C-alpha cells in the first residue's frame, strides 16, 4: 500500500539552511533530541541548520606545516555522518522525478558502511523498507547502526577492498529487478555528485572565511564513491588554480598502479574508478599507509596529553579533537599534510579536507590495534606515532595526474569497468568533457523545483 511522501529539503536548502522558514529551522533543531523524528531531514547540511560551517582547524603543532588545514566535520549530520546527504538526495530525486512513493519498492543501499547507514536511516524516516548490501568484514558498529535503523543486511564476502563483489551483487540481484527495488547506487548515480558539488563544495568555500587569505589552495579527499571529490568542481569554479588531491591506501593502490590488496581504512579504497569520479578535474594522487590512519586515530583518542605536553599543542585544542575522527578522516588529514608539504604552502594558504564521520563507529578498530600492538600504546608510543604519522608525513608516493596521460589512464579504467555493468562506452566517453559534469550539475534547478512542488502538494 502506497503512503504519502515524508518531505525534506531541496539542494538549495541543504546548501544554505537559512533559506528554510525560521519556524521550520527551529523545529528541525529541536528534533535533534530524537533522531527518529522525520524533521531531522531538514538538518542534512554542513551548517547545523544555521549559518556557520561545522569545522575544525587543526593545531599546527600536530600538522607540522605552516598552512592552515581546515576539516569539515560530518559528525553532526543526522545519523552521524555526512553520507546521509547523498543518500537523501538520491531518494528525493527518485520521488520527485520518478514518482516513487513509500510502500512502492524496497530501497537498496550498496555500501561499505556510512552510505548504507545513511540509506537505512533515510528510508526509515521516509517510510521505506531498506536493504544494505555491504562486505561481511566491516566494523561491528556499522552493522549495529544499520539494524538500529531497521535496515536489513545482505553481506558479501570480504572487506573494504572487496566492494566490487558488493557492486556485482547489487546489479545481479537488485538493479536487474527495477519493479521491486530502487537502488541508491552511490558509485554510479549522479545525485551523489550533485550533492557534494553543490552542498559540500559551498561548505568548503565558506569554511575558510576568516582564515589565512580566505581562499582554498587545495582540497584533499580519499574516494570511496568519490562523491566528495565533486566538491572540487565547486572549488575550481571559484579558484581555478586550486589543487584537487585524491588519496588511496598504499595497500590497495588501484588508481596509483592497479594495486588490488586488502586494507584497513573503512569507507575508501574500493578498487575502482567510480562512475561519478570526474577524473579530469583531479590534480594529484597520493598513497597513505593504512596502519598510519589507525595509529593516528589512537593518538587523537588517547594522546591529548601527549599532543599538549610533548608536541606543544594548546591543551584545549588537543582535547577538542577527542572523538572527532575515524580512520578515513585521519587518512584525509595525513593527505592534507602531504599536500601542504608538496605544494610548499605557507601560513596564508588553506587546505580543506573532510571528516566523514567520527570515532563512535570505530572502537572495534582500536581493539584490533591493541591486539596487534600487544596492548594499549604507552605514552612513548603515542608520541612516536604522532611524530611519524602527522609530523613525519612523507613526500613519497605522489603522482601528478596532469602529466603523462594519467587522466586518460584513469578514464580508460572507468570505461573498462562500467561497460561491464551496462553503461555505454559513448556515455562514459562524454565524462571526459567538463561540459558533461556542468550539465549534470545544472539539473539541480529543475530538480529543486520538483522537490518543492511535491512538498507543496502535501
Image (cartoon, rainbow, N blue to C red):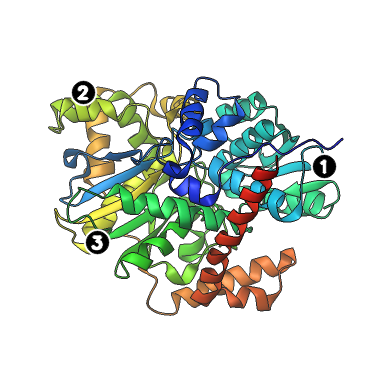
Please identify, in this view, whether the residue under mark 1 or under mark 2 is nearer the observer: 1
Give neighbour class at mark 1: few <14, some 14-19, many 20+ (Cα, 10 Å): some
Q: Nearer the viewer, residue 22 or 412?
A: 22
Q: Residue 329, located in which quarter of the rendered image?
A: top left
Whether residue 168 is visible, yes or no, is: yes
Helix, strand, or loop for circle 2? helix
Going from N to C along the chain, the mark reached first, 2 or 3, is 2
- The number of numbered discs placed on residues in the rendered structure image is 3
Going from N to C along the chain, the mark reached first, 1 or 2, is 1
Please give the residue where the numbered disc 3 appears in the rendered image. Answer: 342
What percent of the width, then of the height, locates residue 69? 26, 47
What percent of the width, then of the height, locates residue 315? 17, 25
Please give the residue where the numbered disc 1 appears in the rendered image. Answer: 104
Left-right relation of 93 to 331: right
Q: Identify the mark at residue 375; answer none if there is no mark.
A: none
Do the residues bearing badges 2 and 3 touch, measured as CB atoms within 8 Å? no
Going from N to C along the chain, the mark reached first, 3 or 1, is 1
Please give the residue where the numbered disc 2 appears in the rendered image. Answer: 305
What percent of the width, then of the height, locates residue 433? 52, 77
What percent of the width, then of the height, locates residue 440? 57, 66
Q: Nearer the viewer, residue 8 or 78?
A: 8
The CA span between labels 3 and 1 is: 51 Å
Amino acid at each position: 500500500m502506497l503512503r504519502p511522501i515524508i518531505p525534506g529539503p531541496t539542494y538549495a536548502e541543504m546548501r544554505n539552511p537559512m533559506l528554510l522558514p525560521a519556524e521550520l529551522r527551529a523545529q528541525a533543531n529541536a528534533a535533534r533530541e530524537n533522531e527518529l523524528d522525520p524533521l531531522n531531514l531538514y538538518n542534512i547540511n554542513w551548517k547545523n541548520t544555521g549559518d556557520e560551517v561545522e569545522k575544525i582547524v587543526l593545531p599546527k603543532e600536530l600538522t607540522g606545516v605552516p598552512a592552515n588545514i581546515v576539516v569539515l566535520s560530518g559528525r553532526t549530520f543526522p545519523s552521524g555522518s555526512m553520507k546521509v546527504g547523498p543518500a537523501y538526495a538520491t531518494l528525493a530525486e527518485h520521488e520527485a522525478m520518478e514518482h516513487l512513493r513509500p510502500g512502492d519498492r524496497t530501497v537498496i543501499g550498496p555500501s561499505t558502511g556510512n552510505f548504507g547507514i545513511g540509506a537505512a536511516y533515510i528510508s526509515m524516516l521516509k517510510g521505506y523498507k531498506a536493504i544494505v548490501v555491504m562486505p561481511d568484514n566491516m566494523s561491528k558498529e556499522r552493522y549495529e547502526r544499520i539494524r538500529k535503523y531497521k535496515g536489513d543486511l545482505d553481506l558479501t564476502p570480504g572487506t573494504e577492498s572487496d566492494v566490487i563483489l558488493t557492486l556485482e551483487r547489487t546489479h545481479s540481484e537488485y538493479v536487474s529487478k527495477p519493479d521491486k527495488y530502487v537502488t541508491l547506487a552511490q558509485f554510479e548515480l549522479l545525485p551523489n555528485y550533485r550533492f557534494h558539488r553543490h552542498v559540500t563544495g559551498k561548505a568548503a568555500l565558506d569554511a575558510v572565511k576568516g582564515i589565512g587569505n580566505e581562499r582554498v589552495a587545495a582540497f584533499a579527499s580519499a574516494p570511496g564513491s568519490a562523491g566528495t571529490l565533486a566538491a572540487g568542481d565547486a572549488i575550481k569554479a571559484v579558484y581555478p588554480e586550486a589543487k584537487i588531491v585524491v588519496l588511496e591506501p598504499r595497500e590497495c593502490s588501484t588508481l596509483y598502479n592497479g594495486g588490488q590488496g586488502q586494507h584497513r581504512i573503512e569507507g575508501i579504497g574500493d578498487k575502482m574508478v567510480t562512475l561519478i569520479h570526474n577524473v579530469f578535474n583531479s590534480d594529484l594522487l597520493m598513497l597513505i599507509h593504512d596502519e598510519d590512519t589507525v595509529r593516528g586515530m589512537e593518538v587523537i583518542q588517547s594522546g591529548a596529553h601527549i599532543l599538549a605536553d610533548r608536541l606543544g599543542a594548546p591543551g584545549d585544542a588537543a582535547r577538542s579533537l577527542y572523538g572527532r575522527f575515524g580512520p578515513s578522516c585521519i587518512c584525509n588529514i595525513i593527505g592534507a599534510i602531504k599536500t601542504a608539504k608538496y605544494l610548499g604552502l605557507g601560513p596564508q594558504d588553506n587546505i580543506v579536507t573532510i571528516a566523514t564521520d567520527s570515532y563512535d563507529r570505530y572502537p572495534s578498530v582500536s581493539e584490533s590495534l591493541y591486539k596487534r600492538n600487544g596492548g594499549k600504546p604507552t605514552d612513548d608510543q603515542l608520541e612516536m606515532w604522532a611524530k611519524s604519522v602527522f609530523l613525519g608525513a612523507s613526500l613519497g608516493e605522489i603522482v601528478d595526474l596532469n602529466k603523462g596521460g594519467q587522466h586518460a589512464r584513469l578514464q580508460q579504467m572507468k570505461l573498462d569497468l562500467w561497460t561491464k555493468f551496462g553503461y555505454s562506452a559513448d556515455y562514459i566517453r562524454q565524462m571526459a568533457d567538463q561540459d558533461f559534469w556542468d550539465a549534470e550539475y545544472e539539473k539541480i534547478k529543475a530538480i529543486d523545483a520538483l522537490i518543492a512542488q511535491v512538498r507543496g502538494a502535501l
